[in-house]
């Protein structure tokens, strides 16, 4: 792999992990309130979340680098735009859920995020199938997070 590709992967990973890191820092204050909220019995232990999210942000970074390095096309441009939009939506969800404790709004925002992720997978697949496949765990985790979000909303109304 040449230096240009390595740099692209490094920047892509830093962007994805940076969004996740800043989100974690900004939502840290809201975590105390979340810990006191009623949660469903199937809620994973707290330690699971940073591990899973780190893996997902790494996959996002790798996937976006693959798309960026692909030949210029309409699908490449659309894919990267949707990627940026879903990153922003992901970031906002954390603030809605943890900091504002707007569980209902966060649930509907998560549906919006899921649609963006699905669109990203579809558009990525037209450019690079591996990049698209790397996003499937993200879609599955966000779907699970949607169930958790809904249950937290219902239990804390």
Image (cartoon, rainbow, N blue to C red):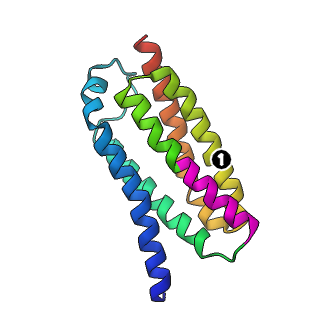
Q: Is residue 3 magenta?
A: no
Q: Magenta residues: mostly which secondary structure?
A: helix
Crowding near pointer 1: few (<14 within 10 Å), some, many (20+)?
some
Residue 41 location, x and y as percent?
37, 23
Q: Which residue is mark 1?
A: 118
Q: Residue at x 63, y 57 (%)?
A: 81
Which residue is depicted at the point 48% across and 60% down? 59
Task: Look at 25% across and 33% down and name the residue there.
Answer: 29
Q: Is residue 38 left or right of residue 5?
A: left
Q: Compared to 141, does 103 lie above or below?
A: above
For the C terminus, give its image quadrant. top left
| Residue 60 spot, x, y in % from top left | 50, 59
- Magenta-drawn stretch contains 79: yes
Q: Which residue is nearer to you in this view: 66 or 72? A: 72
Image spot of residue 12 (x, y percent): 46, 67
Residue 79: quadrant of the picture? bottom right
33 is higher (above) or lower (below) than 63: above
The quadrant where residue 69 appears: bottom right
Q: Is residue 131 left or right of residue 76?
A: left
Q: Residue at x 52, y 31 (%)?
A: 146
Which one is nearer the viewer's eye here, 154 or 4?
Answer: 4
Q: How many marks?
A: 1
Magenta segment boundaries in residue numbering: 73-86
Q: Position of residue 145 (x, y in %)?
A: 48, 35
Above-or-below relation of 10 to 107: below
């Amino acid at each position: 792999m040449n230096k240009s590709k390595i740099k692209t992967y490094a920047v892509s990973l830093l962007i994805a992990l940076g969004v996740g890191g800043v989100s974690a820092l900004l939502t840290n204050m809201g975590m105390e309130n979340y810990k006191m909220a009623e949660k469903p019995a199937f809620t994973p232990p707290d330690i699971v979340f940073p591990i899973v999210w780190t893996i997902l942000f790494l996959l996002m970074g790798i996937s976006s680098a693959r798309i960026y390095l692909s030949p210029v096309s309409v699908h490449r441009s659309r894919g990267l735009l949707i990627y940026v939009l879903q990153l922003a939506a992901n970031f906002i969800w954390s603030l809605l859920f943890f900091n504002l404790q707007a569980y209902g709004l966060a649930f509907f925002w998560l549906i919006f995020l899921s649609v963006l992720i699905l669109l990203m997978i579809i558009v990525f697949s037209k450019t690079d199938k591996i990049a698209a496949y790397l996003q499937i765990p993200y879609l599955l985790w966000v779907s699970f997070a949607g169930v958790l979000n809904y249950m937290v909303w219902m239990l804390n109304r």
